[in-house]
Image (cartoon, grey):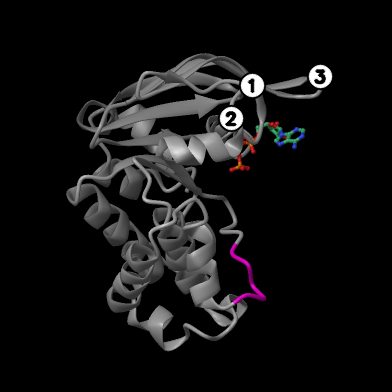
Amino acid sequence: MLDIRNLKVLYGPIEAVHGISLRVEEGQCVTLLGPNGAGKSSTISAICGVAKATGDITFLGQDLLGTEIEDRVRAGISVSPEGRRIFSNLSVEANLQLGAGIRTDRDGIEADIDHWFTTFPILGERRTQSAGTLSGGEQQMLAIARALMAKPKILLLDEPSLGLAPRIVGQIFDMIEQLKSEGMTILLVEQNARQALRISDYAYLLNTGTIQAEGTTATLGQNDELMAKLTGLG
Ligand code: ATP
């Protein structure tokens, strides 16, 4: 579904990602693991069209490189960014409506908002309150729900568990697992290796802008040395 080849991500003269290749098949959850500064967020930004990149990014047979961010959302790519980036001063409901910016089916949008308020009653209770009043975990759920309001074909999740208490981290991973069981294709960036591998099919280990290891999660899980290194990260 998503096929990336020889991707380089550039910040002016600085090359943050040095020609990586990765694939995500429909219905899979694929994880990008790696320490701070490895290039995980840069890879996500390049897929969304936020960061400048070279190489090939093919999504459902369509070449995305050089296309606008909105075109990629229309093609079916949606992101829940690192740091959540919810609009704190806007209401919970307005945040969800913004996620549906490319849609015109008003009734469908309302139905989807109601779906999220039923799934996460706390969001429904606070629908008119500013999103900044939500806890960190609730904001993360809102960020994921907002990304899903675009009705994507692939969901990019950048460090959804970052800065959350262990109990809440469990809830976030349960939510991701639920989405996967419903058929959503997911590219997950995580430092929490053990939890991420538990729900993923395939993983790539990124370090200093290159892929250092990759494999099915079953194979990686059996590599004790690699797992010791990975679990030290998050
Ligand atoms: P983290 O978990 O800390 O976000 P990461 O694996 O997502 O780590 P990136 O944020 O992609 O890593 O950063 C990769 C490299 O690119 C780092 O060396 C970082 O300093 C650099 N970098 C990231 N964003 C920019 C930017 N806007 N301008 C210049 N350099 C950047």
Residue 66 sits in quarter: top right
Q: Which of the two discs, 1 and 2, labels the residue nearer the N terminus?
A: 2
- The quadrant of the picture showing ligand 1 is top right
Residue 186 picture location, percent across and down: 34, 41
Residue under label 2: 46
Residue 47 picture location, percent across and down: 53, 31
| 118 to 157, vertically: above or below | below
Q: Which mark is residue 13?
A: 3
Q: Is residue 158 left or right of residue 166?
A: right
Q: As shown in the figure, which amino acid type bears the numbered disc 1?
A: Ala
Q: Secondary structure at mark 3?
A: loop
Q: Nearer the viewer, mark 2 or mark 3?
A: 2
For label 1, count other residues whose C-alpha is less than 10 Å away and answer few (under 14), some (14-19) or many (20+): many
Residue under label 1: 53
Q: Is residue 125 magenta?
A: no
**Residue numbers of the magenta segment:** 86-90
Q: As shown in the figure, which amino acid type bears the numbered disc 3?
A: Pro
Q: Mark 2 to mark 3: distance in Å?
A: 16 Å
Q: Secondary structure at mark 1?
A: strand
Q: Residue at x 53, y 79 (%)?
A: 134
Q: Mark 1 to mark 2: distance in Å?
A: 6 Å
Q: Nearer the viewer, residue 105 or 185?
A: 105
Q: Is residue 89 magenta?
A: yes
